[in-house]
Amino acid sequence: MENALTEFYFQFHTNQHYFLCHDILEEAWKENEAFSKDDAVVSLILFATGCYHFRRKNDKGAIKSFRKALKVIEPYEEEINLGIDLKAYQKVITELIVAIENGQQFVPVQLPITSQMEQNILKTYPNFVMTEYVVKDSYIVNHHLERDRTEVNEARLNALYQKQQKRNCSNY
């Protein structure tokens, strides 16, 4: 999980690739056999989703994701190791919800990472910075529309084929 968090924070702050951030942590989270939707890391997954929606002006989706992120993280204490100050993180979520409700525009979010996490990120990504301007690269901003979906489409077709084969076998 530590490597995934390092990559998450790099992609989140330097590239603002929130969709990829979601994928990075979701994959790492699901590697844990006992994963639960109440795990603290789920809050960061939802938070990245909220940022993705907010930048794309999907305020309803952003608020929904931010509220879920806040609900998931509220029961946790500081000892949970996500590499951020949890109280400051909760404040960031709350401020974003208020900003959206007040009609404010998206601005890059800086998560309150710990100095230890920042050191970890810099070891792996020496070019780590907290980008202060809004990244507008269409591939990043509209990733769910522009990404290569070949693998996803093939998996869906394969699942459909398997389902049809099962039906055909049960008819005999």
Image (spheres, rainbow, N blue to C red):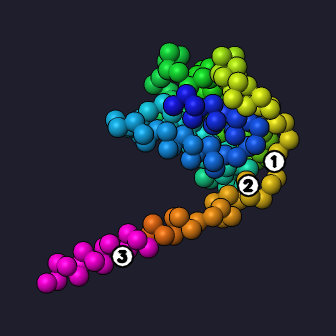
Residue 167 on the magenta segment: yes
Classify residue 9 as left or right of residue 131: left
Classify residue 27 as left or right of residue 51: left
The answer to the question of whether label 3 and label 2 lie on touching residues, with beta carbons closer than 8 A, is no
Magenta residue span: 157-172
Residue under label 1: 135
Label of residue 161 in the image:
3
Tell me the residue at 44%/33% (across/down). Answer: 39
Quarter of the image with the C terminus is bottom left
- Residue 153 drawn at (x, y percent): 51, 70
Q: Nearer the viewer, residue 122 or 8?
A: 122
Label 1 sits on a secondary structure element that is loop
Determine the CA span between mark 1 and mark 3.
40 Å
Q: Is residue 111 visible?
A: no
The answer to the question of whether label 1 and label 3 lie on touching residues, with beta carbons closer than 8 A, is no
Tell me the residue at 68%/64% (across/down). Answer: 146
Determine the CA span between mark 3 and mark 2.
33 Å
The answer to the question of whether label 1 and label 2 lie on touching residues, with beta carbons closer than 8 A, is yes
- Residue 166 drawn at (x, y percent): 24, 74
Classify residue 56 as left or right of residue 61: right
Counting residues from the start of the chain, the first of labels 1 and 3 encountered is: 1
What type is the residue that disc 3 sits on? Answer: Tyr
Residue under label 2: 141
Determine the CA span between mark 1 and mark 2.
8 Å
Residue 137 on the magenta segment: no
Counting residues from the start of the chain, the first of labels 3 and 2 encountered is: 2
- Dominant secondary structure of the residues highlighted in magenta in the image: helix
Which image quadrant is residue 145 in? bottom right
Classify residue 76 as left or right of residue 125: left
Label 3 sits on a secondary structure element that is helix
